Amino acid sequence: MLKKYPVDELEAGMVIGRTVYSDDMSVLLGEGTVLDEQRIEYLDQRGIVFVRILLPDEEESAAAEKPAAEATPAAKTPQIDDDAAAVWRRVQEQTAAAVLAAAEADKQAALAKIEERAGRASAAKVEPEKEKTPEALEKPVSKSGIVLRETSSLEAAFIEQYEECFEELQGFFSSVRAYGRINITEAETAARNFAPLSSSGKAVSHVYNMETIGEYQLHHVMRVAVLAGLMGQWLKMPAQERHRLILAAFLMDIGYTAFAPNFLKKIALYTPAERRLMQKHARLGYDIVARSALQLDKQVTEAVLQHHERNDGSGYPQGMKKEGICKFARILAILDTYDAMASRRFYAKRRSPFEVFSVLSDEFVANRLDAEYGVVFIRNMSHTLNGNWVKLSNGAVAKIVYIDETRMKALPVVQTTDGDFIDLNTTISIKVEYLLPSADVENKEKIS
């Protein structure tokens, strides 16, 4: 049975039921192809709107869904007591390792069954083009998961530096996952080594032009730390305070080390029960940091606990209001929210910076995120975006030539490669889709 799905509703594990063709009738994905994150993004980039998905029959579907249904009660969040060691053992060993690893095994078994069925269907009707793999799915990838491509010399230098810091942070997180405690020397060293990555506003375009595969949580932490270093400059913080803000950005998601790796790699939206479990990372992270010498640094430890709190009391884990939320936490809440929307994720398209600015502005007006720091963030981010190349919704490539930095929701004036100027504040039918690397602009075929 086939069902028509919009591309933005596709999920990893779905099976293509009818060959997908490009405008020139070349094969993009053959019938029987099992979708993953890269293939879904590939379809989106090629402008495909709908695809036909092969659905398992009712018996197979029921068998695939039954384990997940049975796993739901067991996935309930455990009670957390005040003893840090007990918290660590209970969450890491029982909830994360046992329940979530079992759920992952059930998912993989169901997926294998669907793939087997798709393979039988494919064998019954052989088409040579099915074996073709799109060039976009054969991209070389670095050790840290950065998709390698042609870059400018500045971007190449940034990526090299980023890779070194990523490897250092990866080792630090692995150590915390293994032992449940922080090596303060490693943490401080990583933060110091990271500072040069955020020494220039160009870091914004560099870090958001990088395409990464896997290790989403670590790349997210890296990007937020880049923004934290820049915010420290924009707020004119002393060097030591800026260092501490970067350190807080590194540590804000350290509580995730209590969860099974398979849970963090889940290729689907989290269920309500799983989302409640995820929210425990703030408290768990605080407990880890508070057991180290950093317990004396209230801004850092409280930032780890409070970075999901909101000024109006709608956040978690304590539902605190602005007056009780520390400075670093209010800053990181903005940076964390920005990156979640501006970066690629397997279940959501990245948004243009200007679309994110609009969402953030609404959060400031609603008194959920801090307007004092928000205005500084958007004004300076807009300044860094001047001169950047962008892909427009009408397919054109253009360069940002002016942004009114006094308005939080201001859209840019751009000049296309054909020399036309477009004010996106008045031409509302055209939008910025995403930033472009300068090296890609030199070869327009890559982005057409």
Image: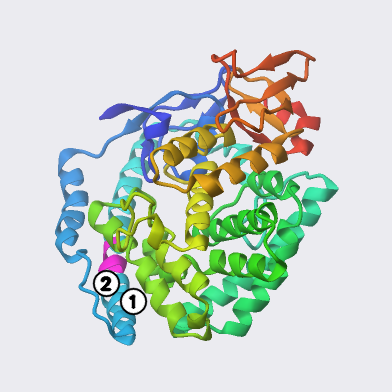
Give the quadrant of the N terminus.
top left
Residue that badge 1 annotates:
92
Q: Percent from the top left, x then y, of residue 327?
A: 51, 61
Callout 2, which amino acid?
Thr
Image quadrant for the C terminus? top right
* x and y, in percent, of residue 360 in the image: 48, 39
- The local secondary structure at tag 2 comes to helix
The residue lying toward the viewer, choosing from 404 and 94, is 404
The alpha-carbon separation of the residues under discs 2 and 1 comes to: 6 Å
Q: Is residue 22 visible to us here?
A: yes
Q: Residue visible at 36% across and 31% down?
A: 17
Q: Residues within 10 Å of mark 2 (few under 14, many from 20)?
A: many
Q: Is residue 173 above or below residue 12?
A: below
Q: Quadrant of residue 305?
A: bottom left
Q: Residue at x 55, y 49 (%)?
A: 373
Report the label total.
2
Q: Residues within 10 Å of mark 1 (few under 14, many from 20)?
A: some
Of residues 49 and 368, which is closer to you in this image? 368
What label sits on residue 95 in the rendered view? 2
What numbered label is drawn on residue 338?
none
Residue 158's spot in the image, x, y percent?
Answer: 76, 55
- What residue is drawn where x is 75% and y is 13%? 420
- At label 1, which amino acid type do we have? Gln
Q: Which residues are magenta?
A: 99-103
Determine whether label 2 and label 1 are within 8 Å by CB: yes
Q: Is residue 40 visible?
A: no
Is residue 236 rendered to the left or right of residue 270? right
Q: Secondary structure at mark 1?
A: helix
